[in-house]
């Protein structure tokens, strides 16, 4: 294993079998792919019933969470014949597990590249046949992974969620800040690639914030938003006059 060179993208080989998932992170230097990190684990529980493409997506999400410091510092190029990101985006309803996976991957610079040669894929496939005997849960922290460490003890903490959304010409944006009682913050930003109103953008920001909080195991949450309409509609004080906002309010209340 070698330390990656700054300024060069990292190449990710994913692999999955009915009993294990794994990934090999490499970097091409002078025409040679040098291994940076390898990670694998057994599938367990409900994961054993996943389809082949879902297990492939699970391998990507698992790797992104465990090796988050690499994913934040380098562009990631996935060498794969199937595009896990495209599969997630093509789902008709982004709810539950798929929504959580997309939320996890949204902050990284990830692209998929069709393989031109086998190269390190054979090594990744071989290593996946011998996964770690001990299951590594997704929420395990890595050394130096401050982002995941924030979620280490959220059961009793009161977190604060601040959200804001705005619509532009043909699209919009959402900004989220999650803050602990100690003042540690998680900043998230999203681009809404669809036409929306300002009120819809505000609701999108609130829902994305709630998903992010739930994903991190937050049990007690104070919510602050600058949209009086969204706040009072959610509390049931304001009536709904725009039918398009009804699904948003239902989702927030759920």
Image: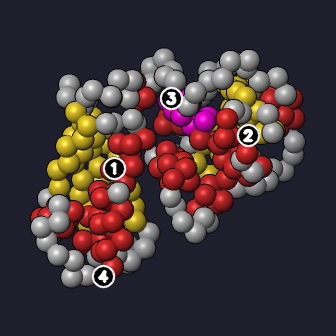
Nearer the N terminus, badge 2 or badge 4? 2
Label located before the other in sequence (4 or 3): 3
Q: Earlier in the sequence, mark 1 or mark 4?
A: 1
Q: Residues within 10 Å of mark 2 (few under 14, many from 20)?
A: some
Residue at label 2?
Answer: 48
Residue 91 numbered mark, or none: none
- Give me the disc on residue 243: 4
Label 2 close to label 1 by CB (< 8 Å): no
Is 65 covered by the magenta stretch? yes
Q: In front: mark 2 or mark 1?
A: 2
In the drawing, what numbered circle is on residue 139?
3
| Start-end of magenta stretch | 62-70
Determine the CA span between mark 4 and mark 3: 38 Å
Nearer to the camera, 115 or 219 = 219
At horizontal 67% and vertical 53% (from top left) the residue drawn is: 84
What is the crowding at mark 4: few (fewer than 14 residues within 10 Å), some, or many (at least 20)? few
Q: Which mark is residue 210?
A: 1
Q: Quadrant of the C terminus?
A: bottom left
| Gap between marks 1 and 4 measured at Cα | 22 Å
Give the left or right position of residue 133, taking residue 147 as reference: right
Q: Dividing the picture into quarters, in which one does residue 67 lie?
A: top right
Where is residue 198 shown, x and y percent of the image?
25, 72
Percent x, y of residue 23: 71, 34
| In the displayed structure image, the side of residue 73 where residue 10 appears, left or right | right
Task: Determine the secondary structure under disc 4.
Answer: helix
Label 2, label 4: how far apart the Cα atoms are:
41 Å
Disc 1, SS = helix
């Amino acid at each position: 294993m070698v330390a990656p060179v700054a300024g060069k993208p990292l190449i990710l080989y994913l692999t999955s079998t009915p009993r294990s998932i794994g990934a090999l992170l490499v970097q091409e230097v002078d025409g040679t792919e040098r291994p940076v990190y390898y990670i694998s684990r057994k599938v367990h529980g409900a994961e054993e019933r996943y389809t082949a493409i879902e297990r492939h997506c699970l391998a990507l999400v698992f790797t992104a969470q465990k090796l988050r410091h690499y994913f934040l510092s380098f562009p990631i190029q996935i060498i794969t014949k199937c595009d896990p990101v495209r599969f997630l985006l093509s789902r008709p309803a982004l709810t539950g597990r798929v929504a959580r996976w997309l939320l996890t991957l949204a902050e990284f610079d990830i692209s998929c590249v069709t393989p031109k040669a086998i190269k390190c894929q054979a090594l990744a496939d071989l290593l996946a046949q011998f996964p770690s005997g001990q299951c590594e849960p997704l929420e395990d922290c890595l050394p130096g992974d401050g982002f995941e460490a924030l979620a280490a003890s959220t059961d009793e903490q009161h977190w604060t969620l601040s959200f804001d959304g705005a619509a532009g010409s043909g699209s919009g944006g959402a900004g989220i800040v999650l803050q602990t009682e100690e003042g540690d913050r998680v900043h998230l930003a999203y681009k809404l690639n669809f036409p929306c109103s300002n009120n819809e953008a505000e609701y999108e920001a609130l829902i994305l914030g709630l998903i992010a909080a739930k994903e991190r195991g937050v049990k007690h949450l104070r919510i602050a938003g600058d949209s009086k309409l969204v706040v009072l509609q959610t509390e049931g004080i304001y009536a709904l006059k725009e039918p398009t906002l009804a699904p948003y309010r239902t989702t927030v209340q759920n």
